[in-house]
Each structure stands twice: as C-alpha cells, then as structure tokens.
Amino acid sequence: MKKIGIVTATRAEYGLLSPIIKKLNQNPGFDVRVIATGAHLSPEFGLTYREIEKDKIEIDQKIEILMSSDTPVAISKSMGLAMISFAEYFDRTKPDMLIVLGDRYETLAVCCAAMNAQIPIAHLYGGETTEGAIDESIRHAITKMSYLHFTSTEEYRRRVIQLGEVPERVFKVGAMGVENILSMELLSKEELEKSIAFKLDKPYAVITFHPVTLEKNRVEQQFDALLSACDAHPEMRFIFTKANSDAHGRIINQMIDDYARGNENAIAFESLGMLRYLSALKYAQMVIGNSSSGLIEVPSFHIPTINIGDRQKGRIQGKTVINCAPEKDAILKAVEQANAPDFRLSIQDAVNPYGDGQTSDKIIEVITDFLMNDRIDLKKQFYDIEVSNV
C-alpha cells in the first residue's frame, strides 16, 4: 500500500478536499492519513475538525499550531510550530506523498517540512493570483516545492509551467468547488432555515470577508463600509460566515458578532459546513465579500457576486462577478447592479470558467499513475520557456 498524507487546516479547505479523501479511502492500494491542524482545532473558529469526524473520516492526528493571536508575529510562530510538529509527524509516519490545497501560511510551513523529509508534494491550485493578499507569494513558493500540480484552469496551468515546472507534471483538472455543487444533494430552503434557525422569507445575501493582508491597518475601515452598506438595505437578510485565521481576522469576527447581535436581519456562523454553505448559496439573492468562493463556486448558481477590493485581484472571473472598491457608496452601487433585472437575466446562461465537475477523478487518476508506477523522481528539472520580450 502507498501511504498518502492529506493536510487540512480550515473548514473551506476540508470541504474541497473531502471528495478526494473519500475516493482515495475506497482504493485498497492507498493508506490515507488525514491530519487536522490550524483553525480546525480552535474553539474560536468552531472546532471544525468535527465536520471531518461527522463525515466518518478518520483523523490520523490532530496537530495544534494556532496561537491565540492573529498578529504577524503570532502567525510566524504558528508557522514555526507547524514545521517542528509536522517534521516529527513525517519522520514517524513516512508518507509516500503529501496532498495539500491552497495558499495558506500553515500549508507553506508543512510543505517545508515535507520537502526536507523528501516527501513528494501534490499541490492543488497553483498558478492563481491574488494580488491583494500575502497568499500570492505563499502559493508560488508551494508550487516550487511541489512535484505534482493540479490547476483549475488552462491559464493557471501555463503559469505553473512558466514558474519552471515540467509540463508533464502539471494538470488542468478544474475546481473541486464546482464538483461539490454538481454532485451534492443540497438542502431545500425549508431544511436550510431549520438547520440555521433563521428565516429566509426575504431576499438575503451570504457575506464572507477576509483580511486583505497586504493592506495594513485598513481592515476595520473596509469592513465597516460593508456593514454600512448592509444598514442601507433593511429589507434584506444577511448570513455572515466568519473570517479565517489570517492576520487581523479576529477584528472582522468581532465586528460580525456585534452586528449580528444588534440586527435581527443578520446571523453569523464560524462555519456553515459545506452542505449548508452551498445550500445557502443556492437560494441567495447575491454573495458579498472577498472570498475566492465568490469567483469559483458561486458562478455555478448563476447569482451575482459582489467582489470587494483587491484580495482576489488577478483571479479569472466570469460575468457573474461585480467588482467594487471597499467603500460604502461603491458597494451600494454594486448591490443595485446585482439587483437589476437586466443584469440578473444576463447571467442566467453564464459559464463557470472553473471546470466541469470531474475534478477528483482526474486528480486520483494522476496520483495513482505516479505512485503505483514509481514515476516519481525528486530531482526536478527546471523547464525553461522562450521569452520573446523581457
């Protein structure tokens, strides 16, 4: 059997990885080891490792790394703890491959430990760009440490190759979020209302806003602008999902809690879980915030995404996305456009640029080929491309 480690640190990350985990578990040739870390183990972020256990997926180990602060110093310390703890874990378990997703600081630290342990890394979603977040640098760093690359679009595949990765190890597979939407049986509106204990008898928006990590000291100002725009629409309801454990995420979460306590038309969750989150999108009037989900998953529901600020700047986006500045007037104007009948009609035939929903099978086919046929050689060559204009 080939031993495969899969690391997950956040609710969103697990929701995307879960179909891959379940399918790998069904293959008798693989010994799958799921490691939960980061925000999964924090009461403040909802102890979301329970969602993994609820899915009857065995967690091989829970590795605590999260500090009780979200300052840059605390994040660096968390990365240090991750490197130490995962170095010990890899030395003990010796996986044949490590699967990671995304661009978070915990993932970078884990990949450093795996690289030193000479464990080949399979990375989901290199080549993307998010110019407003430090994730941009982290993502490309993980790409250079990884052996197999799974990208969500052809443009992103070309970008990974541009970083010097050999084309034969870079695969366009689409986005796992699209597969989840097409494959999951979502809740009815009545079931969703009961599950979240919140009436959805009026048009509502799902709101997720994360810190823009390369814009210092602006998080409170930007999120206050969003809340002020919500105040201007008392006829709507608002479902907030809280920010992740990035720097200054706790500021946003405190503001969300204060707003939800003071407004009967708003409710807040540390985590909805994948089923409830996608079900909430299905019946929403619009999605507001700066999460990648607004660009990747939401277009499959043919509803508007109001994408605020620069956090997702550079990502490929479909015509369901409305971009605006993190200012009250700009957000209000975007809401007006999202509600306009002509705009809503124009996006009913919108094509999601992130794939056809067959992602997990494509990923597992490649991993199976490389592991079972001993095709891995960690002495990577740098693939040079011709550059016509420098």
Image: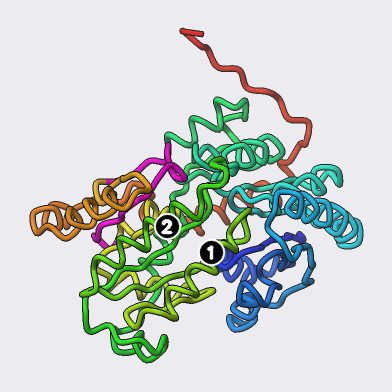
Looking at the rendering, which quadrant does residue 357 occupy?
Answer: bottom left
128 or 233, nearer to the observer: 233
Specify the segment rendered in magenta.
301-318
x and y, in percent, of residue 332 in the image: 24, 55
State if disc 1 and disc 2 touch (CB < 8 Å). yes
Q: Main secondary structure of the magenta part?
A: loop
Looking at the rendering, which quadrant does residue 180 occupy?
Answer: bottom left
Looking at the rendered structure, the secondary structure element under dot 1 is helix
Q: Amino acid at mark 1?
A: Ala
Residue lying furthest top in this view? 389
* Residue drawn 47% across the image and 45% down it: 311
Looking at the rendered structure, the secondary structure element under dot 2 is helix
* Residue drawn 47% across the image and 8% down it: 388
Q: Amino acid at mark 2?
A: Ser
Distance from disc 2 to disc 1, alpha carbons, whole Å, reads 9 Å
Left/right placement of residue 275 relative to residue 215 reads left
- Asked whether residue 19 appears in the rendered view, the answer is no
61 or 357, nearer to the observer: 61
x and y, in percent, of residue 157 in the image: 49, 35
Callout count: 2
* Residue behind mark 2: 293
Q: Is residue 312 magenta?
A: yes
Left/right placement of residue 251 relative to residue 359 reads right
* Residue drawn 35% across the image and 74% down it: 280
374 or 341, nearer to the observer: 341
x and y, in percent, of residue 197 in the image: 39, 90
46 or 61, nearer to the observer: 46
Upstream in sequence: badge 2 or badge 1: 1
* Residue behind mark 1: 12
Q: Residues within 10 Å of mark 2 (few under 14, many from 20)?
A: some
Left/right placement of residue 82 relative to residue 149 reads right
